[in-house]
Amino acid sequence: MEALNPDNRVLVTVVEATSASGRSIPGFVILPGKLLRVKHLDSCLDDQTMLNTSPNGYIDDQLALDWFDHWEKHSRPLTALRDAFFSTTMAVIVQ
């Protein structure tokens, strides 16, 4: 394990979601860069946690859509929000 150095910090974005009933989906982590390093893959994260990269470590349009796919995959059994507003909104997001 690397020694902690306050001058050597990396900011990351973590997107998490928890329902009102307390059920949560695995995290969605965005690291700065273009490639994931081996040290990021060899961790104690949940097997379902998604590791992603972006040039600055922040979420962008494509990663937001990727997170939505991740959310939908892990919440599908609970997805019961199919009223007219939700369907219209989702059609706009997906397009």
Image (cartoon, grey):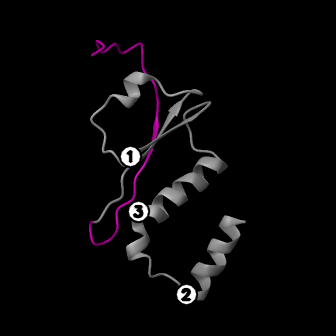
Which numbered disc, 1 or 2, marks the residue closer to the eye? 1
Instruction: Give the magenta range.
Output: 1-22
Spatial CA distance of label 2 from label 3 is 20 Å
Spatial CA distance of label 1 from label 2 is 30 Å
Residue 50's quadrant in the figure?
top left
Residue 19's quadrant in the figure?
bottom left
For the residues labelled 1 and 2, say whether their Cβ atoms are less than 8 Å apart: no
The residue that mark 3 highlights is: 74
Residue at image location 55% in from the left, 87% down from the top: 83
Q: Which tag, 2 or 3, sits closer to the chain's start?
A: 3
- In the image, what residue type sits under mark 2? Asp
35 left or right, relative to 78: right
- In the image, what residue type sits under mark 3? His
Mark seen at residue 83: 2
Residue 68 in the image, given as x and y percentages of width and height: 54, 59
Q: Is residue 82 magenta?
A: no
10 left or right, relative to 95: left
Residue at image location 41% in from the left, 67% down from the top: 75
Residue at image location 66% in from the left, 50% down from the top: 61
- Classify 10 Å Cα crowding around label 2: few (below 14), some (14-19), many (20 and above): few
82 left or right, relative to 92: left
Residue 16 in the image, given as x and y percentages of width and height: 40, 53
Kindly state the secondary structure of the residue where label 3 is placed: helix
Quadrant placement of the N terminus: top left
Q: Which tag, 1 or 2, sits closer to the chain's start?
A: 1
The residue that mark 1 highlights is: 49
